[in-house]
């Protein structure tokens, strides 16, 4: 490599590392807050009033759901795009995107830590946070749009100079996911345009339901943003750990197109129990939610097919032989595979939550908390951590420090999460409310059956925290490991099984699919938004109740 | 599998009328205490074995407290908020709804067993959220 090319690659690697390290910092801080919450609900500790439970809960939710995941994903998609096709020379736009995201994050996080935005990560009006919180969140989103623009301009440049060649699969998965993200975040950006003037005192009141509909227009695709990143890892990074290939190029593209189209028009399944939304819209969104299950089934099929084909090439036959043959001692594989196991539980719970009539049994109970910990905290977090064990050594040229510790970390996370989330699910079925610092209700008889479950969840949370400490040791050990370029592990995305068959050219028409996705979102939301705007004009004044 | 699942829910919704609470009525959240019937919350008899229970949720309590209702009677709960978002949940009964300022939520239930039922707010509403609870006494 010439000096210039080499410097350029180093700069590109550094940009991806900046995203991954920022995500790691958020994960570690978020985990500490998570531990405190688990211990508070189990009545192991009493959190002091000067740094109260709900402030910690807000910080945990924002750092884990919005900061850790988003930074890891913007890093992953930047990496997947740069590595799978010739890059536009400058990475300046990518750096600007990361910088803007960081500024927004620091603004929002400082507002939360100072106690001026104890509104939880859903910031439901009329709870009114300090304007810096809303500005910070909006700036974070703008930063992600800049990263998306950087990926788009690279793909456009590739298409210009390679007419007729399909977009490389890793870049394809990245751009489709980012298009979905931009469409979804338009909703929360619109919500910010209502919340910001109101928090500044320029408007006297807020239409509570309108802000909630806009929030959940974004809130569910947010979940699919995480899942699509995990799917990219499962399809394209994990097969390298067992010498396998991606099952099918065309099937992967089709799954991502389905996810693009069906991730947005589903948000009302979070609002089944809200009085102001007509049940016909709730029903429609439930049907669409079941539609988005299809690409997940396709993915499950493709992943197992990839396992089996690779095992057959290695001379293994049958289910048990295939499972035993898989590289369970590779932390990238074990992270993703254990995440997949947790996702079986997550998928099952999700189908219950999205069901129009069963939601009432679990809405706002600990069941929901259990559910999103076996989704974002399971397949998503474990796949991200597992992928980092491959990516960071390849990006830094430093060997993974203590690989056995990294391996044990993924298993401990799996068992801790299983313990915590199963007991949360049970507590939820018994009616234990979520988002509550202490659920003893002064010793009320109806609250006593929850305590045992909260103790088990607290112990599970402690295991998760130990797992995070192990991750920190591996991360710091790797970052400070002596640099040796000869040690640099090579990194390649998995090849595809059906490389000889070109995917249908229509799949590459990103603009067309974006247009269809916007049309589907508009159709699903035109009715509910029209209802909100036309029903009544009672506005609620903002309040600071913490 | 998905089709069977969707079919079951659709059947329950259309034939048996199992729908989540939707579109009851709106109310000015700043004038809840002046708006009937929420100016005088509590239980009203509307039929031979049928009652309406009006509740106001405000930080960090429900009004009325310790409502007494007859066992085996159908109770229609109407709940609204005079400040922020709240929840209205009686664990293990299926009584569960969001309470949104500007709107009245409705949920119906028949208590078949006498006893003291815990009623909690299950949506974060502020610093004292964990104390926002009362009970319903079924006699």
Image: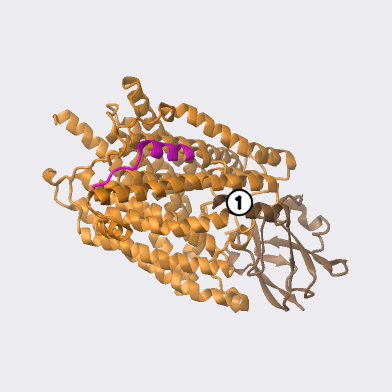
In the figure, residue B59 lies in which quadrant? bottom right
- 10 Å crowding of disc 1: few (<14), some (14-19), many (20+): some
Along the horizontal axis of the image, is B40 left or right of A261? Answer: right
Write down the chain letter for disc 1: B
Instruction: Read off the residue under disc 1.
Output: B6
In the figure, residue A101 lies in which quadrant? top left
Along the horizontal axis of the image, is A448 left or right of A155? Answer: right
**Is residue A277 visible in this depiction of the protein?**
no
Measured as percent of width and height from the top left, residue A254 is found at: 43, 37
Measured as percent of width and height from the top left, residue B116 is found at: 69, 77
Along the horizontal axis of the image, is A391 left or right of A23? Answer: left
Quarter that holds the N terminus of chain A:
top left
The colour applied to the residues of chain B in this rendering is: brown
User: Which residue range is magenta in the image?
Assistant: A243-258
**Is residue A224 visible in this depiction of the protein?**
yes
Along the horizontal axis of the image, is A301 left or right of A434? Answer: left
Quarter that holds the C terminus of chain A:
bottom right
Considering the numbered disc 1 on the image, is that residue within a helix, a strand or a loop? Answer: helix
Q: Could you tell me what secondary structure mostly forms the magenta stretch?
A: helix
Chain identifier, colour orange: A
Measured as percent of width and height from the top left, residue A315 is found at: 22, 52
Vertical comparison of A251 with A159: above or below: below
- The residue lying at 45 percent from left, 67 percent from top is A38
**Residue B32 is inside the magenta segment:** no
């Amino acid at each position: 490599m010439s000096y210039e090319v080499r410097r350029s690659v180093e700069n590109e690697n550094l940009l991806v590392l900046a995203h991954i390290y920022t995500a790691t910092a958020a994960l570690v801080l978020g985990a500490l807050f998570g531990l405190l919450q688990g211990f508070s609900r189990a009545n192991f500790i009493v959190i002091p009033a000067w740094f109260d439970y709900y402030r910690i809960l807000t910080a945990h939710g924002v750092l884990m759901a919005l900061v850790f995941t988003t930074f890891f994903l913007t890093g992953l998609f930047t990496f997947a795009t740069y590595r799978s096709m010739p890059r536009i020379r400058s990475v300046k736009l990518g750096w600007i995107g990361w910088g803007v995201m960081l500024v927004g994050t620091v603004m929002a996080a400082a507002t939360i830590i100072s106690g001026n935005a104890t509104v939880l990560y859903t910031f439901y009006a009329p709870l009114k946070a300090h304007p810096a919180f809303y500005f910070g969140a909006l700036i974070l989103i703008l930063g992600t749009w800049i990263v998306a623009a950087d990926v788009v301009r690279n793909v456009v440049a590739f298409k210009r100079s390679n007419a007729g060649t399909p977009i490389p699969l890793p870049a394809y998965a990245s751009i489709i996911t980012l298009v979905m993200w931009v469409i979804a975040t338009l909703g929360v950006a619109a919500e910010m345009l209502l919340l910001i003037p109101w928090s500044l005192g320029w408007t006297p009141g807020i239409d509570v339901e309108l802000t909630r509909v806009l929030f959940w227009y974004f809130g569910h695709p947010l979940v699919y943003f995480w899942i699509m990143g995990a799917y990219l890892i499962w399809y394209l990074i994990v097969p390298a750990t067992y010498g396998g290939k991606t099952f099918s190029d065309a099937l992967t593209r089709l799954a991502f197109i389905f996810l693009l189209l069906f991730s947005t028009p589903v948000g009302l399944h979070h609002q089944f129990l809200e009085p102001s939304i007509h049940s016909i819209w709730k029903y429609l969104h439930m049907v669409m939610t079941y539609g988005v299950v299809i690409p997940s089934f396709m993915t499950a099929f493709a992943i197992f097919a990839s396992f089996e084909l690779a095992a057959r090439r290695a001379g293994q036959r049958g289910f048990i032989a295939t499972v035993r043959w898989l590289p369970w001692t590779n932390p990238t594989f074990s992270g993703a595979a254990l995440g997949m196991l947790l996702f079986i539980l997550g998928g099952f719970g999700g189908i219950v939550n999205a069901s129009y009539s069963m939601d009432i049994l679990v809405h706002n109970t600990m069941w929901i908390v259990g559910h999103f910990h076996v989704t974002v905290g399971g397949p998503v977090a474990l796949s991200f951590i597992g992928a980092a064990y491959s990516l960071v050594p390849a990006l830094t040229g430093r060997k993974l420090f203590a690989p056995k510790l990294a391996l044990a970390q993924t298993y401990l996370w799996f068992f801790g999460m299983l313990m915590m989330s199963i007991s949360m699910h049970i507590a939820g079925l018994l009616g234990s409310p979520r988002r509550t610092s202490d659920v003893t209700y002064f010793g009320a008889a109806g609250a006593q059956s929850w305590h045992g479950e909260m103790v088990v969840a607290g112990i599970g949370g402690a295991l998760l925290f130990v797992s995070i400490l192990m991750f920190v040791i591996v991360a710091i050990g790797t970052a400070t490991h002596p640099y040796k370029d000869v040690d640099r592990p090579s990194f390649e995305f998995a090849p595809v099984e059906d490389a000889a068959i070109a995917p249908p050219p229509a799949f590459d028409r990103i603009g067309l699919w974006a247009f269809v996705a916007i049309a589907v979102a508009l159709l699903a939301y035109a009715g509910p938004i029209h209802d909100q705007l036309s029903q009544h004009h009672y506005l609620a004044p903002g309040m600071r109740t913490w | 599998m998905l089709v069977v699942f969707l079919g079951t829910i659709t059947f329950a919704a259309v034939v048996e009328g199992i729908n989540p609470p939707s579109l009851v009525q709106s109310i000015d959240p700043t004038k809840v205490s002046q708006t009937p019937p929420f100016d005088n919350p509590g239980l009203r008899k509307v039929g031979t074995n049928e009652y309406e229970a009006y509740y106001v949720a405000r930080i960090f309590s429900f009004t009325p407290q310790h409502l007494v209702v007859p066992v085996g009677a159908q109770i229609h709960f109407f709940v609204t908020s005079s400040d922020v978002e709240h929840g209205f949940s009686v664990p293990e009964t299926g009584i569960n709804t969001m309470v949104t300022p500007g709107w009245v939520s409705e949920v119906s239930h028949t208590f078949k067993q006498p006893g003291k039922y815990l009623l909690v707010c299950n949506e974060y509403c502020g610093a004292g959220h964990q104390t926002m609870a009362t009970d319903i006494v079924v006699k």
